[in-house]
Structures are given as C-alpha cells and as structure tokens.
Amino acid sequence: MNKQLTTIAEENGLEKTQAQVILGKFTNFFEQAKEWETKAKTLVITDISQVEEMKQAREGRLILKKIRTEAENTRKDLKERSLREGKAIDGIANVIKALIVPIEEHLEKQEKFIENIENERKEKINADRIAQLVQYVGEDVNLYNLKEMSQEGFVKLLETSKIVFESQKEAEKKAEEERIKKEKEEKAEQERIKKENDRLKKEAEAREKELVKERAEQEKKLEVERQKARLEAEAREKAEAELYAKQKIEEDKKQEAMRVAEENKERAKDERYKIFLKENGYDTKTKHLFHIEKVVDEVRLYKIIGTFNIN
C-alpha cells in the first residue's frame, strides 16, 4: 500500500480498519496515475511528424481523465456515506441525551433539595431588598450583592441610601427653585431691556424724523442758495462775456489801427527809400553800378567808379 496515502490516513487519526477500507478504494487509482506519470515524461513532441506520439499522448490523457473522474466519484460516494453515518450517530446520541437529561435534572433537584430551599429563601430576600432599595439608588441596585448581604449590613445600606437620596432630592429641589427664580429674574430683566429698547427705538425714530425734516429744510435752503449763486454766476459770466466781447472789439480795432499805421509807415518808408535811390541815380538800368549795404538802421549806397581785371 502506498506510503504517502497511509501517512495522510494516520495524520487524520483514522482507525486502522477504517483507514484500510478507504485506502483500498483509492490505491488502485494512485498506482495507475503513478504509472502514467512515468510514461508521460517519456512523451515529448518536438516535430509535426511525431503523429504516433501525439496519438499516445491523447490515449494517455483520456485514460488519466477516466481515472480522475472515477476517483472523484469514489470520493463523493465515501463522503456521502460518511455524512449519513454522522447523522445517524448524532440522532442516536440525541435520543439517549433526551432520555437522560430530564432524569438527571430530577435527581439533581432531589439531591439539592435543601440548597434549593435556601436559594429560594435568598431569592425572596433579594427581591424584597431590591424593592426597598431601588427607590433610592435606581439602576445602581445591581452593584450590591443583596442576596448574600447580612440583615444588619442591608439596614445600614438602606438608611444611608435613603439619606443620600433625600439629600439629593432636597438639593435638586433647591436647584430647581433657584433655576425657576433665576428664569423669572432673567425674564423680568429681558422684559425691562425690551421696554428700554422699545423706548430708545421710538426716541431714535423720532430723532430720525426730526433730522430728516431738518435735513429737508436745510437742503431746501441750500438749494435756494445754490440757485441764487447759480443765477449770480450766470449773470457774472454774462457780464464778463459782454465785457470780454467789448474789450475784444476795442482791442481788434486798436490792433487794426496799429496794423494800418504800421503799413502806412512801411509804405512811407518805402517811398522815401525809392526817392533816396532815385535821387542818387539808382534805377533798374544803373543798379549794376551800385552796391547797397545795410548797417544797423541805415542803408548805405556806394557807387562803383570802375572795375579792373587783374588776370
């Protein structure tokens, strides 16, 4: 039998007989697969002419597929059988358990008769103590092991809890009274502030109306003054324009007179200049015999006596 399969069976804790049955089902598949493992390694196709080898590869693959399929079917069959066995085992065990548990519980009850009576007594005491204490400590009652606590300890705890509870209630009452008082004072203060704000708002609105009225009157006065100033400015501009126009006309006349006088002066000077030239024998026919030179405000006339060619 294959050692590898035997090891798997042993590692999973199967009994020897059970392991032999399972291994017997799979050993043949394993041996056939190992045999084909050796054959498959010898089949190596490297050329298209190896048709026979390709045929052997196909035959081997189909045989191995059949071995694998049969092994898988065997696995499913064994596992299904195992599941049915497990269900049967569980069912039988549950019947035995259902038979024994009620008897076991009855006998335990008889065995612990005194203990159960004591537990019932303690439970009753515990329930009574919870009912007394819960009104003072609320959910905190679960913090105490009232069932095992002595009567003296419980009485002391109850008294202490009551004192603390009543103190807290008194403090809460005072705090609530203080809160209500504070709320009333705050409400009264808010009412006072609201009235004061309303009064200030009305006064501000009245002042604003008065200011609007004053501003309107002031604006009206300013508009009258602006209109007056505008009319005065227009009159002043008109007077200045008329004065400028008058002065322009007078200035133009003055300039024109000066221009005419200057032209007359230039014309007279030109006439005197022509007379000067004529009196000295200068005209268009003789002008080549003369040389004219301007010196400052004078015109000097020189007559050429003669010319000599030095070449």
Image: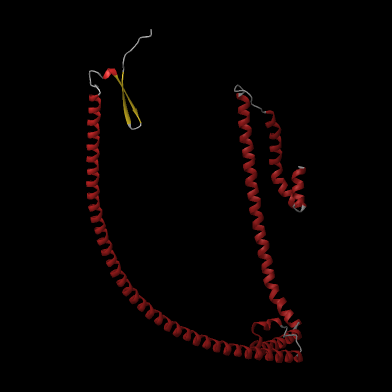
Where 289 falls versus 40 (above or below)?
above
Left/right placement of residue 83 relative to residue 291 reads: right
Up-down: is 291 above or below 138?
above
Of the pair 4 and 286, the residue shown nearer to us: 286
Q: What x and y, as percent, mark residue 276?
A: 25, 27
Residue at the spot 69% in from the left edge and 70% down from the top edge: 97
Q: Seen in the image, is 219 located left or right of residue 23?
A: left
Residue 213 image offset from top left, x and y in percent: 33, 76
Residue at x 40%, y 82% (from the top left corner)? 203
Q: Quadrant of the C terminus?
A: top left
Looking at the rendering, in which quadrant would you find the N terminus?
top right
Colour scheme of the rendered structure:
secondary structure
x then y, percent, for residue 185: 53, 88
* Residue in the picture at 24% in, 55% down: 243
Going 60% across and 31% down the picture, which residue do you hit? Answer: 58
Of 63 and 189, nearer the camera is: 189
Q: Position of residue 140 (x, y in %)?
A: 67, 82
As drawn, the residue found furthest toward the top would be 311
